[in-house]
Amino acid sequence: MKEQNDQSYSFDIIYFVQLIWKWKIPVIVACLISTLATYIFTGPKFITPLYKASVIFYPTSNTNLSTTLLTEPGNQGYGVLEFGNDEDAEQLLQILSSDDMKNNVIIKYELAAHYGLDTSKTISMLTMRALFSKNLEVKQTEYKAIEVIVYDSEPELAAEMANYIANYADSKKNDIQKVKAKEALNIITEEYNRQIKMMDSLNVTLAVLRNLGIYDYFEQSSQLNEAYTLNKIRLEQEQALLKVYEENKSALPDTLIIKSKARVKGYQAAVNSIKPTLDLISKHGGNYLNSINTLEMERKKLLSLKMRYESAKMGFEKTLPQKFVINSADKPEIASKPRRLLTTAIVSISTLLFALVAIVLLDYLPTLRRNYFERN
């Protein structure tokens, strides 16, 4: 730097180097002091080192387990093998950011005592959540995966909490879905049991009709009507023939008349035995047909309800993981915070820059003061 006409102050690299060389000792001392002070005061005696543990996973697709597994492979893709979309990821992110998740971690790992708070006094969960949130990061990576990061003074605990939080998201989403699945199962179970009772009632009605002798309306009606008509015709024919025999019995042997009377009695007995069953079928046939048709329709309904019942039962009793884990949290070996070397380097460079600015200002100050007095 140098003066020109006592009015200006222009930049001169040579003069600037000479100026730095003139102040080299104070600058070096300031940089050394700041470097040593930063390195010392960022040490474990002054700042508790924090270890970083992280879990990375992708959400699974939000598919219905029973629908996927109970459907023929050619009719529907196996969604359980697919990665989730943005909506699935947002659902898990919301669970991982919930107060319920934080409360579970705080209670499970007794973080109040771990953070050095006086547990003999009442500590609000709001305070604990605020403290825990400072050591927790939940975010979505650039590749759409979810990353859970936990910082803690104990590396083993940091890894354990990170894995627990990831598993919590899995179990919590399944629990939420189970609430709805249970309601659906209760509804379909009630309908299924009602359908079974209706089927039992129809079977009881048919059992009563079968006990009366009605087994197959169409087959029995056809055969009995045919037999009744045939025996009725034969009876009438034989009665007419017997009448002729009796009118001419003097010219006929007795055995012929006896045989004719026997056939009349046989035909009459056949007609008399068939007639009650025909009357019974005529009386209860409509009820039998109605019960059979209704039973068939209700059997189809029962089959459909049974499939839905099994689907709802599987959806409630069975669960699948809600995530594909890419990296589980392992025990970190190096502290993540504070970053002593980086912090020391930044402070040292900042001190050097500040010292250079200060030297320039100190060198320029006499010129600035002189110009001020000259104007006044």
Image (cartoon, grey):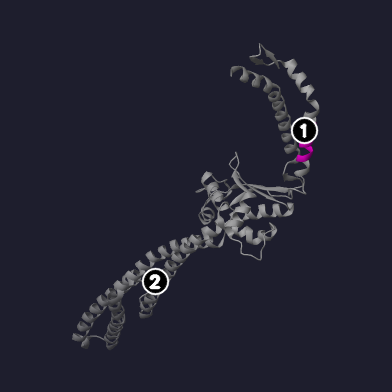
Q: Residue at x 72, y 44 (%)?
A: 336
| Residue 191 figure quarter | bottom left
Q: Nearer the viewer, residue 174 or 108?
A: 108
Instruction: From the top left corner, tell me how far across and down residue 55 is, in percent.
Output: 66, 48
* Residue 308: image tag: none
- The segment highlighted magenta reads 29-38
Instruction: From the top left corner, tell me how far across and down residue 122 is, in percent.
Output: 61, 64
Is 344 on the left or on the right of 305, as rendered?
A: right
Q: Residue at x 66, y 66 (%)?
A: 120
User: Callout 2, which amino acid?
Assistant: Met
**C-alpha distance separating marks 1 and 2:** 94 Å
Mark 2, residues whose alpha carbon is within 10 Å: few (<14), some, or many (≥20)? some
**Number of numbered labels in the structure image:** 2
Q: Is residue 78 visible?
A: no
Residue lying at the far top of the rendered structure: 5
Quadrant of the snapshot with the C terminus: top right
In primary-sequence order, the first of circles 1 and 2 is: 1
Residue 99: say if magenta. Answer: no
The residue labelled by disc 1 is 30
Is 286 on the left or on the right of 308, as rendered?
A: left
Q: Residue at x 29, y 81 (%)?
A: 276
* Residue 198: image tag: 2
Location of residue 340 with respect to 93 vertically, above or below = above
**Mark 1 falls on what kind of element?**
helix
User: Callout 1, which amino acid?
Assistant: Ala
Q: Which-is-in-front pick, marks 1 and 2?
A: 1
Location of residue 310 with respect to 365 vertically, above or below = below
Is 230 on the left or on the right of 311, as rendered?
A: left
